[in-house]
Image (cartoon, rainbow, N blue to C red):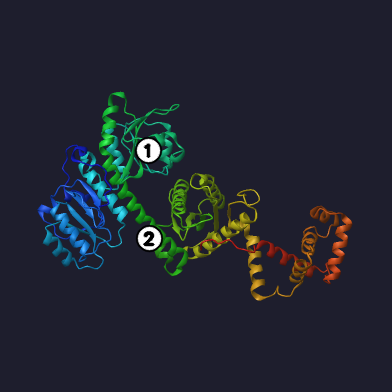
Amino acid sequence: MDIEEQGLGEGDLHGAVVRLSDCIQLMQADLVHANPTPENLGHPVSDVLMYDPLDEWTSVDDRIILAVGLTCGSVDFDQLLHRAANSNAAAVIVKAHGTPMERLRSAAVLHSLAVLVAPDNVDWTRLVALARASVMGAAADSVSGVRLGDLYAFANAAASITSGAASIVDPLGRVLGYSTLPGQPVDELRRVTTLSLQEIKPPAFDTDFKIVYASAGAVLIPSRDEEMDRLALAVRAGGELLGSIWIIDPGEDKREAALDALDRMAPLAGLHMLHARSAADFGERRNGDLIRTLMDDTAHASFAAAQLGLDAAHGLAVAAFSIVRPETWTLESVREIQRLLHLVTTVCNIQFNTSHSALIDSVVYALLPCEGTTPRAVHRRVVQEIGAYAHTISSYPLFAAVGGIAPRVEDLPESRSEALQTLQYLLRRHTATPGSNGGQSPAAGLFEDYRIPLNLLKIGAFIADTGLSDLDDITKIQAHDAEQQTDYLDTLRAYLASNGNISTMAARLHVHNNTVRYRVARLTKDFDLDLDDPQKRLWLWLRLTTMDLTPQAKPTMPK
């Protein structure tokens, strides 16, 4: 038996009796009860276990058992039901995987045991967290009237009980909900964080948050400067840190009662935060699907825009963001890209009072409104601000680009293409000049900032695709340099870049003027080049420029 014990006895629940019906209602996980009877629904629940048939069987009295990996009709499943019934288990949760409900009901009735059927696509990790939080939350009924997942209503309830303004913050520092009860004192820090929906300093770098996360219960955080004291509590479910609750200290006479109230509401806080996160996850998936439709399916773009409530009267622009790591699809890379999505969403919410962003194929996209007289200046400021916070989510470079303005939603695919082209170009420049995220190799920009090199890249691709470069002068010079270890191509590049000025060429090549004259003379003679011909110079310069813009090994970017 693989038991993720939390040590939750009835004494820890302040004497409250938790029934199976309470847990089912609080979980809200689309569970189907195979045999709902008054006896089953009224069975007391004390904890949640994850079952492993290879482990030694231990007491499961009043526990909900999660039958991970078992199917109805298997020997292991039948043995589990037999053992669970004989050990007075509260219920068994299983996935049907195609098993008819009538067969599951018959098995449940045979063993006189509550069997709950979970959807096949549900995540077991999330389910066990919800189940455990529901067991704890059902006993903490002080704020049970709040709709699950409504963190603003929960914050109001917490503020009322503790007599102090409340804020709920996730591990990334986002304010998920805050109280709005009139008359409760607040300080400037509270005003700033509730307006921006973001803590000033990320929790990972904040000493106060670290103190709270390391504490087993609610603690007092003394004030700094002119701020007010705060009471704070880390919220967890199944050992996972979900965030924290912060209360403006109600004063010494009410402090102990407020700290005790915070500790008592911790289980239900975890349940609310889990449900809020589930709703947010669903919202993110829905946003992703609709934004993908906008950028990939012009036939249904207007429908997707209506679903998102997009106002495209002044046009929209697609912004693309990506963190470039040497390894991809590791756990840490997934966490970082999720943090990036949250960062982009937060900054766009602050700037535009709305945000339409989504993670699609390892790239975070945002749809930027184009209101006002200088929308591109606003777009530039937004991507630069996001870039300024990038170090808080990853030690690897962040690349950001904004495509051109799409006057209609049907034009968004072109804006997305321009954003990705710019993103790719920025990455190439970074690869060519390692260690440089700014200056010579900036990490963020607008499409028009790089329109000329991007157009030249298209010309270079056309030249390569049509074979126009196969037997021209540049190809011949390249082959000669490679075979004879000469540097004619560098000489030609310096000649064209310097407009034929010998002194400028000598400075660029770090050689004497006479050496430059000799090399140019040999270059024109050996390859029969007429450098006085303007069309010849144009072709040579175009070939060299497009070749220099295109790296030999192109870095890969998600599409």
| Residue shown at the point (87%, 65%) measured from the top left | 521
Label 2 SS:
helix
- Mark 1 and mark 2 in contact? Answer it, CB < 8 Å: no
Residue type, label 1: Tyr
Instruction: Compute the Cα span from label 1 to label 2.
Output: 39 Å
Q: Amino acid at mark 2?
A: Gln
In the drawing, does residue 543 fall left or right of residue 330? right
Which mark, by number, is residue 213?
Answer: 1
Residue at (85, 57) in percent of width and height: 502
Residue 55 in picture, x, y percent from top left:
26, 54
Q: In the rendered image, which residue does mark 2 sit on?
A: 307
Which of labels 1 and 2 is toward the front? 1
Viewer-proximal residue, 147 or 375? Answer: 147
The mark found on residue 366 in the picture is none
- Which of 156/32 is in front? 32
Q: Which residue is pictured at 55% across the width and 55% down the height?
A: 401
> Would residue 544 be seen by someone viewing this image from the given angle?
yes
Q: Position of residue 40 (x, y in %)?
A: 13, 53
